[in-house]
Amino acid sequence: MRVPGTGSWFVRATRWLNRLHAIWACLSPSAAAFTMMSDTRVTGSAERGRQIAEGNFLFAGFRLPAPGQDIWDLPMPSAGFEAAVHGFEWLDDLTAVCDFHTNRLAQDWTHEWIRRFGLGSGSGWTPELTGQRVLRWINHADQLLAGQGRAKSDAFRRSLSAQAVFLSRRWKTARPGLPRFEALTGLIQASAALSGMDSHMRRASRALSRECRSCIDSHGAIASRNPEELLEIFFLLNWAAAALQLAGQPPENGHRAAVTAVAPVLRSLRHVDGSLARFHGGGPGTVDKLDWALANAGVRGGAARRSELAMGYARVAHGRTTMIVDVAPPAATANAHASTLAFEMTSGLHPLVVNCGSGEVLGKSRRMVSRTTSSHSTLDVEGYSSSRFAASSDAFADSAERNVREPANVSLERNDYNDGTRIVAGHDGYLGRCGLNHWRTLQVDPAGSKVKGEDVLLAASDDGRKRFDALLSAQRLEGVPFNIRFHLHPDVEVDADEEGHDVSMSLKNGEIWRFRCRGEVALSLEPSDFLESTSSSSRATNQIVLSGLATEYSTRVGWLLAKARRSDGVIPEDELVLE
């Protein structure tokens, strides 16, 4: 969870104004009645809920064992941990367990928040956290109020009413994008559940429509190009639409148009196992959440057409194999990754080739490493990333944040034939440093059992050749060192032959895939990390690395990734030949 930095005067002033408006909101008249209205069942993880009930707290990558301790008495190891607690992230998980003990904990901790912070104190009074909290309270109101007396029910209603008033005054100060969608959706849901707040709902609905037009383009893309963030926004838009329709107020045009545009994009960004591709800080998402949102969006049809990109990604699906490739420049944002031409690949329900993921919860240094090109399954020129990290001017961001700039141009050509799909893509991210462009060809056969690839470093222009020659001369290099990386999922068992020409990869379903290469490169297996936002540590895994030197104006490396044994034990008849 990203939390605004604490160093800037802007952030300090915003925090002070939030506190002031929270106190004013708590002094406002409360709604006369609360109606349980949630048709949206957001369920968390029962396993995480049991862990929380036992006193094992894991938020924002920090694991804190505190058996028997009230959640509000915990030491807060990070701002992200504290934000997750005040946003009631844990409520979805506790209520998923559905037993007396966890329901009682959910009730007690909710009412304790009202007692301690309900008059405007604490760090939870920001528009985005208030939006998250309100949504979860309303969604689980039947469990939170079950068996509670009149006094606690009234306190719940008064607090919910105060938070709705706060949101009506402060949603504009939420950061554009997901935080603002959270604030507005929370306001719409609270206004629908509380009597006398119709005017707040109408204004929030219009504001949500404007935000949709501002943050989501006509093709269903958002600026960050983060698939998981797009899912969260899409889920909120569907949630808001359900609340509006239940209250007899149809969503505004911009709201409806955004839902219609985003649905096919998300379908295109799913692997065959239902998870999302992990790019630009996003994780795999929650499959059930995406299924619910797509089912309730009312948008018929499948993924985007093959010839169309989905938010800058090309999807290839044949047989039981999906490949998703980043074929667009990264956004100039603080969370973008230098992942141009990287791909992820899944066979059936089993991920094979992945990117390392976001190191955000592991600290600034790991976060920056996870954004570099070497943390993705693509080619990197040693010592460089395909995108340059520059100082951020974002008032919300920590001073150590970086924006991403370059490559300026990314090219793509796609052809779908009877014998499969061929993608040729290139970028100029290394042009300014060493005069080289990177071109990648990916060809997938119709059965999804064979991927032929070629990576090319090319000095295509006179200026590029001059830069290339000058670099070799100035640094007395024999060639420009490069690596082509294929990060593997931790569940993949790998074995390389002694001669270093062949790698065998075994999946849990019994499939075996083989990797071979050609060209003046050395093949090696090296350690890698698989990063997940829900874990306080990385998972050890492996990467296939092809290392070489670009000594000429054109350097070509071919490689083959092919299925050598199916999950049923059948060995394909095709020979594993790399032409």
Image (cartoon, rainbow, N blue to C red):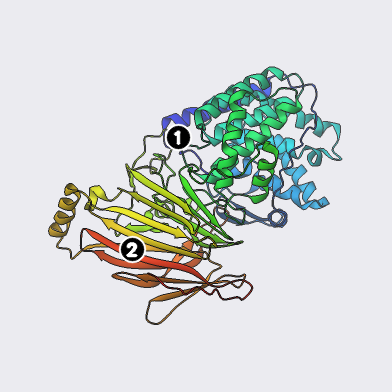
Which corner quadrant of the image does residue 440 belong to? bottom left
Is residue 23 visible in the rendered image? The answer is no
Can you name the residue that lies furthest to the bottom here? 498
Disc marking residue 231: none
Can you name the residue that lies furthest to the front here? 418
Q: Position of residue 20 (x, y in %)?
A: 57, 24
Which residue, given by chain and number where applicable, does mark 2 sit on? Answer: 483
CA distance separating discs 2 and 1: 35 Å
Query: Which residue type does callout 2 highlight?
Result: Asn
Which corner quadrant of the image does residue 251 belong to? top right
Q: Secondary structure at mark 2?
A: strand
Query: Which residue type does callout 1 highlight?
Result: Phe
Quadrant holding the C terminus:
bottom left
* 223 relative to 241 in the view: left or right: left
Indicate which label's residue lies in the foreground, 2 or 1: 2
Q: Nearer the viewer, residue 566 or 91?
A: 566
Disc marking residue 396: 1
Q: Position of residue 213 (x, y in %)?
A: 53, 27
Q: Position of residue 44 (x, y in %)?
A: 69, 49
* 572 relative to 341 in the view: left or right: right
Quadrant holding the N terminus:
top right
Q: At 53% from the left edge and 62% from the top edge, which residue is drawn?
A: 448
Q: Are marks 2 and 1 in contact (CB under 8 Å)?
A: no
Which corner quadrant of the image does residue 35 belong to? top right
* 551 relative to 323 in the view: left or right: left
